[in-house]
Image (spheres, rainbow, N blue to C red):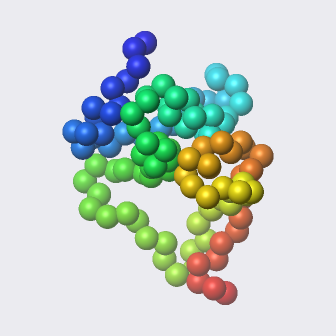
Amino acid sequence: CPTARVREMLDLGIHVGLGLDSAASSGPIDMFAEMRCAHKVSGSISPSEIWRMATEAFVPGMQEVPKIAVGESPPLIAINKQGAKSIEDLLSCEPAHVSWISCNVGGS
């Protein structure tokens, strides 16, 4: 397959998402490896754009990003990468740097 023209799509305002195949068909799941590969292959997409493609959801017709209501406990992760000071630093992470955390937004 040819490489997708992601830079062109982004410049046209097209929402682009970065995802993974099933572990059953593609081996270990590592979104950081996917982000690094996208950065390497694209050449013209910034680490911030790659991060957004991997972490932001887009639903056609949605006017704003959904908000977390008081009392909800959304699933959240913590990325523990010593010395990370930028999104580009986070692209060097591995799944071992990620842990699930519990968050109770209501403060109870």
Placement of 76 over or under 68, stated as above or below:
above
Visible in this render: residue 53?
Answer: no
65 with respect to 28 (left or right): left
Q: Name the foreground residue: 21 vs 51.
A: 51
Visible in this render: residue 47?
Answer: yes
Q: Residue furthest left?
A: 12
Location of residue 84 in the rendering, given as x and y in whole percent from the top left corner: 66, 55
Q: Residue furthest bottom?
A: 108
Q: Residue furthest right?
A: 96
Placement of 83 over or under 15, stated as above or below:
below
The image quadrant where one finds the C terminus is bottom right
Location of residue 37 in the rendering, given as x and y in whole percent from the top left corner: 55, 29
> Which residue does the image show at 52% across and 29% down from the upper left?
40
The image quadrant where one finds the N terminus is top left
> Which residue does the image show at 46% across and 49% down from the upper left?
48
Location of residue 100 in the rendering, given as x and y in whole percent from the top left corner: 71, 58
Placement of 98 over or under 8, stated as above or below:
below
> Which residue does the image show at 43% across and 29% down from the upper left?
42
Location of residue 67 in the rendering, given as x and y in whole percent from the top left corner: 43, 70
Q: How many tags in the picture?
A: 0
Q: Name the foreground residue: 57 vs 37.
A: 37
Q: Name the foreground residue: 16 vs 108.
A: 16
> Which residue does the image show at 61% across and 71% down from the upper left?
73
